[in-house]
Amino acid sequence: MKTKSYKTTITCTGCIDKVTPLLNEVAGAGNWEVNLRTKTKTLTINNMETDNDVLISGLHDLGYKAEEIDIPETEKQ
């Protein structure tokens, strides 16, 4: 499955609770995940149709940053 990955300032479960409505609306429920276990927190979107500008702008409005990054397929979980 092709995915989009973002380095993000979402750092805790409280943050995830805050962004969940936006991510469900923009990417679709079940089509995203935030990895809090690594030093660089990453948001992975499993919906290639997701509009980057809408996603990044929406997160910014909620007080978070996101920058699209390239993660090799071998490192994706």
Image (spheres, grey):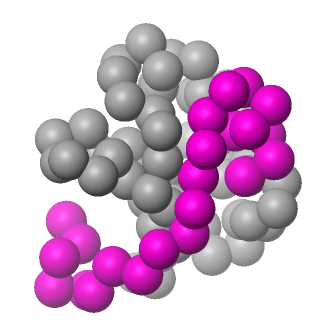
Instruction: Identify which residue is drawn at 34% across, 22% down.
Output: 12
In the rendered image, the quadrant that contains the N terminus is bottom left
Residue 62 placement (x, y as % from top left): 72, 26
The quarter holding residue 63 reads top right
In the rendered image, the quadrant that contains the C terminus is bottom left
The quarter holding residue 22 reads top right
Residue 24 lies within the magenta run: no
Residue 37 placement (x, y as % from top left): 16, 41
Q: Can residue 65 be seen in the rendering of this structure?
A: yes
Tell which residue pokes out farthest to the top in this image. Answer: 14
Q: In the visual, does 64 lie left or right of 4? A: right
18, 68: nearer the viewer: 68
Q: Can residue 24 be seen in the rendering of this structure?
A: no
- Vertically, is 60 above or below 69? above
46, 64: nearer the viewer: 64
Number of marks in picture: 0
- Vertically, is 43 above or below 4? above
Residue 11 placement (x, y as % from top left): 37, 30
Residue 57 lies within the magenta run: yes
Instruction: Identify which residue is drawn at 59% across, 52% down.
Output: 66
Instruction: Identify which residue is drawn at 37% across, 53% down.
Output: 42
| Magenta part of the chain | 56-77
Q: In the visual, does 6 lie left or right of 62? A: left
Q: In the visual, does 34 lie left or right of 76? A: right
Instruction: Identify which residue is drawn at 72% across, 52% down.
Output: 56
Residue 6 placement (x, y as % from top left): 49, 61
- Vertically, is 77 above or below 8? below
